[in-house]
């Protein structure tokens, strides 16, 4: 029976010296020693055949081994657990917080929202429409003669010819859709992205944004147009702003005008931005041509209206003093992060 005694003693030594690195090692060890087919089980099996005079001594030794093993394993598990809790709680509470960077709104969106918001105070609602249009909504309904240069391949991105499907060159197409679906009085602003086949430079891009507006009712006059635009200019560029109108031409308005606002940088005295004229061009406008009203199913004998249209990038450039239009499309965060808190 000396072999059994030495087996027990060897195992006891192993248990006492056991130094695990992690939970898996402890668990493996537990199965090896205390498991159903483990070393203790085979010792108990062997114990059955032990002679009566040795039973007492060896029985005590096996039980000691068993209890030591159980205690040791529990103790090891507990100590590992507490190390783990300490390390997950081991946070330096004095460390400064790291800022989450949240995005800022794009300066084009900011200005577009501001424009539609100013007109909403005058009772204008907002309408949107498709970027891919047909010839009728972009040109024909708006009194463009068939040979008008704006229909030319030079300006318009065509998607299909005959019948012509194209990328809208202005958001006037939304006004056409509004006139077709609503009865006067109509007061609507139409923001959106437009496309023109133009060379990209500091002042032009093939993709840009417009907000156009339309007011149709009985007895709408040019004076209403002028007052509306003056209100807009003051709200957008400051109370001291003045406007002037120069005669112009658009197929869909008669009479037509180009609107200038007094330069908000030099107060009208003349500077680099206004090219020493004191004035900045901000939009086109005019009284809706009766042909357009009739084409869109509105009685031009009963109703009249005015329309206007402006480039959002241009307004944004003038408002913020941005000198290159291409900056709006480069997605450089150093540029974009400057705007959110200005408006
Ligand atoms: N649709 C014109 C353009 O894109 C702008 C405009 C709108 C001018 C309404 C007059 C009246 O240039």
Image (spheres, rainbow, N blue to C red):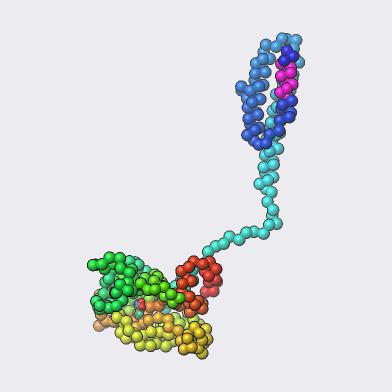
Splitting the image into 4 quarters, where does residue 176 fall?
bottom left
Q: Residue furthest bottom?
A: 269
Total count of labels: 0
Splitting the image into 4 quarters, where does residue 233 fall?
bottom left
> Where in the figure is residue 91, as x and y percent of width and height?
68, 51
Question: Is 324 left, or right, of 19 in this rendering?
Answer: left
Confirm whether the magenta stretch covers residue 5.
yes
**Highlighted range, magenta:** 4-12
Task: Inspect this view and state whether residue 231 appears.
Answer: no
Task: Inspect this view and state whether residue 203 appears.
Answer: yes
* Up/down of 97 relative to 323, above or below: above
Answer with the quadrant where ligand 1 appears in the image: bottom left
In the image, 318 versus 74, the foreground residue is 318
What residue is rendered at 46% in x and 69% in y? Answer: 329
Magenta part mainly helix, strand or loop?
helix
What residue is rendered at 40% in x and 84% in y? Answer: 259
Confirm whether the magenta stretch covers residue 81.
no
Question: Is 40 left, or right, of 253 in this rendering?
Answer: right
Question: Is 236 left, or right, of 139 in this rendering?
Answer: right
> Where in the figure is residue 1, as x and y percent of width and height?
73, 12
What residue is rendered at 46% in x and 86% in y? Answer: 279
> Where in the figure is residue 46, as x and y percent of width and height?
67, 15
* Up/down of 43 relative to 181, above or below: above
What residue is rendered at 32% in x and 74% in y? Answer: 154
> Where in the figure is residue 57, as x and y percent of width and height?
76, 15
């Amino acid at each position: 029976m000396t072999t059994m005694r030495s087996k027990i003693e060897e195992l006891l030594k192993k248990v006492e010296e056991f130094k695990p690195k992690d939970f898996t090692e402890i668990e493996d060890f537990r199965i090896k020693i205390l498991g159903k087919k483990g070393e203790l089980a085979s010792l108990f099996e062997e114990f059955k055949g032990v002679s009566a005079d040795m039973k007492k001594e060896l029985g005590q030794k096996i039980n000691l081994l068993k209890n030591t093993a159980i205690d040791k394993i529990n103790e090891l598990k507990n100590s590992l657990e507490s190390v783990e809790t300490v390390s997950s709680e081991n946070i330096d509470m004095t460390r400064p917080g790291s800022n989450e960077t949240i995005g800022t709104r794009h300066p084009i969106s900011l200005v577009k929202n501001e424009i539609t918001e100013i007109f909403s105070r005058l009772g204008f609602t907002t309408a949107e429409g498709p970027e891919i249009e047909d010839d009728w909504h972009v040109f024909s309904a708006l009194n463009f003669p068939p040979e008008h240069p704006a229909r030319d391949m030079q300006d318009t991105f065509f998607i299909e010819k005959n019948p012509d499907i194209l990328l809208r060159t202005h958001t006037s197409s939304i006004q056409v859709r509004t006139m077709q679906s609503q009865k006067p009085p109509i007061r609507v602003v139409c923001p959106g992205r437009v496309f023109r086949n133009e060379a990209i430079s500091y002042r032009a891009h093939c993709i840009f944004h417009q907000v156009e507006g339309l007011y149709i009712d009985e007895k709408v006059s040019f004076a209403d147009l002028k007052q509306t635009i003056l209100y807009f200019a003051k709200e957008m560029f400051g109370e001291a702003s003045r406007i002037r109108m120069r005669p112009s031409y658009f197929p869909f308005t008669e009479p037509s005008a180009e609107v200038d606002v007094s330069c908000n940088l030099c107060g009208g005295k003349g500077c680099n931005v206004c090219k020493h004229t004191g004035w900045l061009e901000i939009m086109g406008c005019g009284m809706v041509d009766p042909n357009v009203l009739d084409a869109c199913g509105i009685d031009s004998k009963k109703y009249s209206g005015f329309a206007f249209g402006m480039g959002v990038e241009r307004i944004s450039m003038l408002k913020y003093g941005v000198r290159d239009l291409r900056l709006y499309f480069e997605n450089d965060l150093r540029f974009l992060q400057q705007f959110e808190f200005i408006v």
